[in-house]
Image: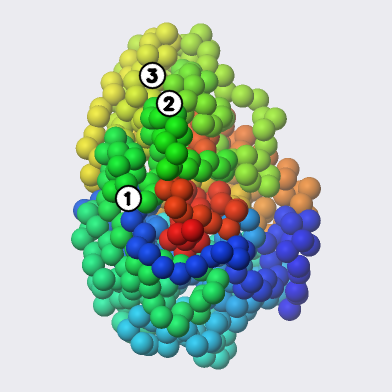
Amino acid sequence: MTRISRRGLLGTGAAAGVLAATGLPVRAQAKRGGRLRLGLAGANTSDSWDGRTHSDTFMIMMAYGCVFDCLTEIAADGQLVGELAESWEASPDAKTWTFNLRKGVTFHNGKPFGADDVIASLNLHVADGAKSAAQPIVSAIDEMKKLGEHQVQMVLKNGNADFPFLMADYHLLMYPAGQIEEAISKGIGTGMYRVEAFDPGVRFVGKRVDSHYKDGRAGWFDEVEAIAINDQSARMNALMTNQVDAVNRVDFKVEPLMRSNPQIEIFEVTGNQHFTFPMLTNVDPFTQLNVRKALKHAVNRQELVDKILLGHGAVANDHPIGPANQYYAPDLPQNEYDPDKAAFYLKEAGMEGLQVDLSAAEAAFPGAVDAAQLYQASAKNAGITINVVQEPNDGYWSNVWIKKPWCASYWSGRPTEDWMFSSCYETGVPWNDTKWENERFQSLLLDARVELDSAKRAEMYREMQSLCSTDGGTVVPMYANYVDAASKSLTNSGTIGNAWQMDNSRFIERWWFS
């Protein structure tokens, strides 16, 4: 087995080797106590403890880093650390991975955690009809072997230098083998907080588990209450009137007012989050490349950054790799707002006077409806009529996204390029929200996955970003910073994660009352 240090991994672009579970940095004044009250967007009445279905903030935060654990974790500083896996090692070809599991861990119902739970939990994602977003991760595993009660070996179909990073995917929650149906029904995990109350789309209450394996490193609140507040104004008001202690997705329009409040702290980080308008490329007129090109040149990206993000982000270029990714290619030719060029492509497609529907709701991203209307206005100059269809917030991800031909959406991005591409751009994966297929892209995806030479990997990922930008079915007009807010009575380690919003969605574990 090959053992590689994290520094060595970064040097080769590979996320392989053995990484100890060192935990998160903690200030000396970190202390237990108090009830954390969160006001969160991203809740739905269809929410459940089935990690395969999680797609928005509320359930990701309640499950990931609260009630459940994964094998690995992205620390606040971007390093990969062990969670339920203490360490791991790879064969030289990065095809065989052995995970050494933490001993002495129990589920909330008292069942000991072990190798059987890992195998059963991962197999959930490839079960018939699972429709899991993590299906491409688990389907890449050819065989899982139990080497002992606390050791699992995974043999991949093809080598993957980033494989341990993928085990930190928030869908890959660990459930008790033989009791998974009950665990999903009741929320039985190994996390720091056990479920006291859960009303889907409304409220969650969790209580701190005593004698947890993370004691002294994380989990400082005695209790956690999360209230679903999808309405932006109501959510901001809840923090400003001290009804909650922290909120996600700050309303940029009231952000200056919030900053002026001496009791509130805004925390903003630049990550890989991007706001998008995906088109189903297997539905007319989006089957035509020239129509897709026309729509990419019909949006005024800088206007969206200025008026929707109010400067809290940057112009993007129709691919999903962000400024926090190692192989981000900022030097690609930019798809500029050019009505004449958009009109040219429409003429090439024989689609002059194009009329299309664009579905949007605030559930997609803050300001999504306004963004769609700005898109509508800029596209008029190219002779394109966009009919903005305002959809209900509740059920948006189950009834509109990947159902309607063109809609608003968002992606948090992923810490590695392969993780991002394989989650939503690989042919046939459940979250390919454009149904885009490109033979060259798929070939590069497989080749880059096993390539350990960083320079060669960079070339491959650059070409893949270019293919998305020029051929793909997603309009990605802007990168958006994560902007969340909390009471100044709360504090943290001093480093805030940028992989997902709210400190890598682990705010509950990592913050405490000062």
Residue sitting at 40 percent across and 45 percent down? 248
Cα gap from disc 1 to disc 3, whole angstroms: 33 Å
Residue 468 in which image quadrant: top right
Q: Look at discs 2 and 1 and give the one toward the viewer.
A: 1
Q: Position of residue 203 (x, y in %)?
A: 24, 57
**Which residue corresponds to mark 1?**
244
The residue type indicated by label 2 comes to Ile
* Vertical position of residue 495 compared to residue 394: above or below: below
**Which residue corresponds to mark 3?**
374
Q: Is residue 312 in sight in this rendering?
A: yes
Label 3 SS: helix
**Which residue corresponds to mark 2?**
308
- Mark 3 and mark 2 in contact? Answer it, CB < 8 Å: yes
* Vertical position of residue 148 compared to residue 194: above or below: below
Residue 249 in which image quadrant: top left
Q: Look at discs 3 and 2 and give the one toward the viewer.
A: 2
Q: Position of residue 289 (x, y in %)?
A: 48, 27
